[in-house]
């Protein structure tokens, strides 16, 4: 403790902020990599809802406070011997703290762009080309099966035609969807 007692008050306060903030940040990082920060009903963040939307980013949250205090304290410690004007040092430290929060926001936005919804929707196959898997009977006299590829995954779906019978292996175009799950096809 003598190490801290010999410091000037401003530098000591930067250290008093930096040490617990860094420990909390390390714990948060370990918990994030372990998946412990997922939504399990317990949340320590204040939901500010500043954008009136379903944004993942919250301006007033424990995580953002930690990022701000990390930037503030460690920049204050780093620049303490280089910037002799204490007011300027404080402004630079606050600016870097705000920059840390902004960088976190940018990183989160970039990570959100990596999310992809690969859930299958039958409406996504409309006007696509497919291959007949089981013969499609003529004039809606029964159902056949077609194979269609959506996002690299093959789907076997029920199909009917309003024209003549379509044999297995033929290529068809999906022209309409009936009853939410039956595809109307035409031979190509």
Image (cartoon, rainbow, N blue to C red):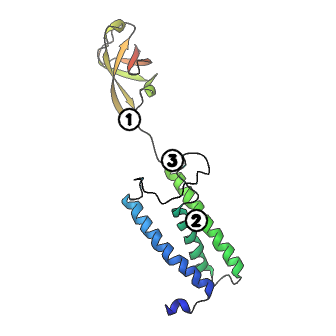
Residue at image position (61%, 65%) is: 99
User: Which SS class for mark 3?
Assistant: helix
Question: Is 63 situated above or below 177?
Answer: below
> Label 3, on which residue?
113
Residue 152 is labelled as 1
> Label 2, on which residue?
100
Instruction: Give the quarter of the image for residue 178.
Output: top left
Residue at image position (34%, 7%) is: 138
User: Which SS class for mark 2?
Assistant: helix
Comparing 74 with 56, the one in front is: 56
Left or right of 90: which side holds 125? left
State how far apart marks 1 and 3 are (Cα): 20 Å
Tally of marks: 3
- Check if mark 1's residue and mark 2's residue have beta carbons within 8 Å: no
Instruction: Give the quarter of the image for residue 33.
Output: bottom left
Left or right of 180: which side holds 141? left
Question: Is 10 situated above or below 160?
Answer: below
Comparing 173 with 181, the one in front is: 181
């Amino acid at each position: 403790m003598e190490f801290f007692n010999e410091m000037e008050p401003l530098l000591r306060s930067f250290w008093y902020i930096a040490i617990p903030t860094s420990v909390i940040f390390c714990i948060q990082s370990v918990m994030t990599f372990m998946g412990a920060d997922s939504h399990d009903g317990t949340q320590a963040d204040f939901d500010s809802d500043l954008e009136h939307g379903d944004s993942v980013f919250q301006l007033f949250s424990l995580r953002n406070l930690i990022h701000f205090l990390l930037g503030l304290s460690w920049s204050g410690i780093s620049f303490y011997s280089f910037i002799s004007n204490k007011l300027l040092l404080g402004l630079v430290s606050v600016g870097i703290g705000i920059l840390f929060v902004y960088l976190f926001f940018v990183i989160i936005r970039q990570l959100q762009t990596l999310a992809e919804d690969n859930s299958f929707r039958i409406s996504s196959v409309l006007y696509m080309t497919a291959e007949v898997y089981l013969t499609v009977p003529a004039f809606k006299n029964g159902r056949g099966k077609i194979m269609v590829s959506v996002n690299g995954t093959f789907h076997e779906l029920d199909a009917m035609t309003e024209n003549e019978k379509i044999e297995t292996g033929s290529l068809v175009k999906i022209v309409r969807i009936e009853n939410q799950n039956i595809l109307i096809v035409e031979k190509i």
